[in-house]
Amino acid sequence: MGQVFDLAIIGGGINGCGIARDAAGRGNSVFLCEMNDLASGTSSWSTKLVHGGLRYLEYYEFHLVREALIEREILWRIAPHIIHPVRFVLPHHAGLRPAWLLRLGLFLYDHIGGRKLLPSTRSVDLARDSVGKPLSPGRYRKGFEYSDCVVDDARLVILTARDAADRGADIRTRTRAVETRQSDGLWRITVEDTLSRERSTIAARILVNAGGPWVEQVLTLGAGVNTRARVRLVQGSHIVVRKLYDHDRAYIFQNSDGRIVFAIPYRDDFTLIGTTDRDYEGDPAKVKASSEEIAYLCASVSEYLAKPVKPQDVVWSYAGVRPLYDDGASEAKAATREYAFELDAPGGAPLLSVYGGKITTYRRLAEEALEKLSPYLKGTKAREGWTAKAALPGGDMEVSAVAALTANLLRSYPFLTEGHAKRLALAYGTRAAKMLGTAKTTTDLGREFGATLTEREVCYLISDEWACTVEDVIWRRSKLGLRMSAADIAELESWFAERTEAGRPREAEARP
């Protein structure tokens, strides 16, 4: 209770971490608590896109699309190791949207967002171009190819939190807020370590509720606020199958129900397919891809592909709940992806609640949040807009430099395989060398658990990226769970068990 933070944030998803980073970079003292792992909620269950949202043009969401398109290249520049451009192929389905409407939408998509680095749209003859080969023969002759970006969504959150911590923010994972109350013009937030069950209380001048799907529950902890805004929970499910085709383009497929489904190259050997949109009721922590959703996604892409995708082809499925701002839209697919804020000061101390948003616009959301809080904060004007220029950890390089970074790693650490070096470059960027340290041989990296995951890397994830469990390592900080065998995972679980105290790895004892 000695320190009084300028800002206390509840929620360690992309919005909470984005606000923490921006506020800390402007000189504010920041405390953030997350009841589980960073990005363990909505932020790691996305379609892995940094994009404008082409389909939102149909709902006249021009402001949202424009803002997202501007952010697309900003985010690519500050995190080129985890964000990469991809060309998307949109086949024209004769029975659905007319070709002229698609072309008009893509013209707007190319021009309303200040595109500078990404190539523009082109028309494609699917009967002649290689991108038409995976499609049903003779069925789709005309298409369009446009640009967007893909992202490692969970790593985006973790690196944003890492940068916030490097700038002084106190980031606490596995720490649940159990009570919020006001006293002497300050917020008193009681938090509980979910592993040790120890409780403590911190004080802050401002409270930010970035609880995502739990934003309304956070308000019941004692804040004394009668919120007017409502959150609409929309389930989005995805499937991953073995690689469906050889080229590097993604597809966007139109469905007869008005929705679209993506098929995106994923982790070299896989294809990611998603997403669904349906309203969700229940505990957001228990959401799972249903058999009906999996069948829907398989049928949607099979409508276009020469070789059908079947539910038994699925090697991994996941689902998340999007906490959208409830604008009263009749269908989940039409619910806005815009974000909204509610600012209250029930006892004199301000509380800002965040509703909605999407990964692509998280940085702007953070800026707007601090603009709303500026009358209460000392450092909101200092370095305003800085997050658009400052690289995220490991991202201090040109957008095209990943291949060169891989080559540098191979020169500095010749015992690495090319695949291992490329994976580290894509995950850690220029910080890969920090993780590898002074290693001279593979032995120096400690035990290998499979799929190039080594003891040295796991220890780095524990010490620098808040990893506490096997799931944290193989599904959020990497997707090596797709490649590791059951025996590999069991060995890693055993390693964690040997080095764990009160549920947390003893990092100092874990180092090889």
Image (cartoon, rainbow, N blue to C red):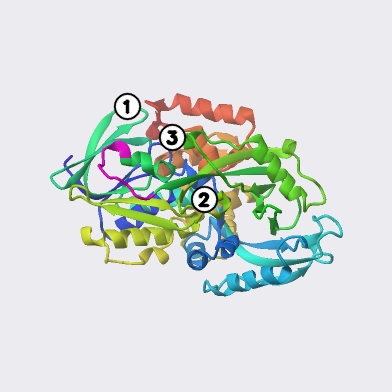
Which quadrant holds residue 369? bottom left
Say which residue appears at 48% left-offset and 52% top-offset: 328
The amino acid type of the residue labelled 1 equals Arg
Q: Position of residue 282 (x, y in %)?
A: 48, 34
Decide whether residue 222 is among the magenta residues: yes
Q: Mark 2 or mark 3: which is in front?
A: 2
Check disc 1 and report its element: helix, strand or loop.
loop
Q: Which residue is mark 2?
A: 153
Q: CA distance from mark 1 to mark 2?
A: 30 Å
Q: Are marks 1 and 3 in contact (CB under 8 Å)?
A: no
Q: Which region of the structure is painted magenta?
A: 220-229
Estimate how packed mark 2 is, as few (under 14), some (14 to 19) or many (20 or more) residues with alpha carbons within 10 Å. Answer: many
Q: Of label 2 and label 3, which has the lower sequence position?
A: 2
Q: Which residue is mark 3?
A: 468
Say which residue appears at 54% left-offset and 73% top-offset: 112
Q: Which residue is mark 1?
A: 197
Q: Position of residue 368 (x, y in %)?
A: 35, 62
In the picture provided, is 64 more to the left or to the right than 25?
right
In the rendered view, would you say 272 is above or below 108?
A: above
Say which residue appears at 64% left-offset and 51% top-offset: 418
Q: Of label 1 and label 2, which has the lower sequence position?
A: 2
Q: Position of residue 462 (x, y in %)?
A: 43, 38
Check disc 3 and report its element: helix, strand or loop.
loop
Decide whether residue 335 is among the magenta residues: no
On-image quarter of the N terminus: top left
Estimate how packed mark 1 is, as few (under 14), some (14 to 19) or many (20 or more) residues with alpha carbons within 10 Å. Answer: few
Secondary structure, magenta segment, majority class: loop
Q: Are marks 1 and 2 in contact (CB under 8 Å)?
A: no
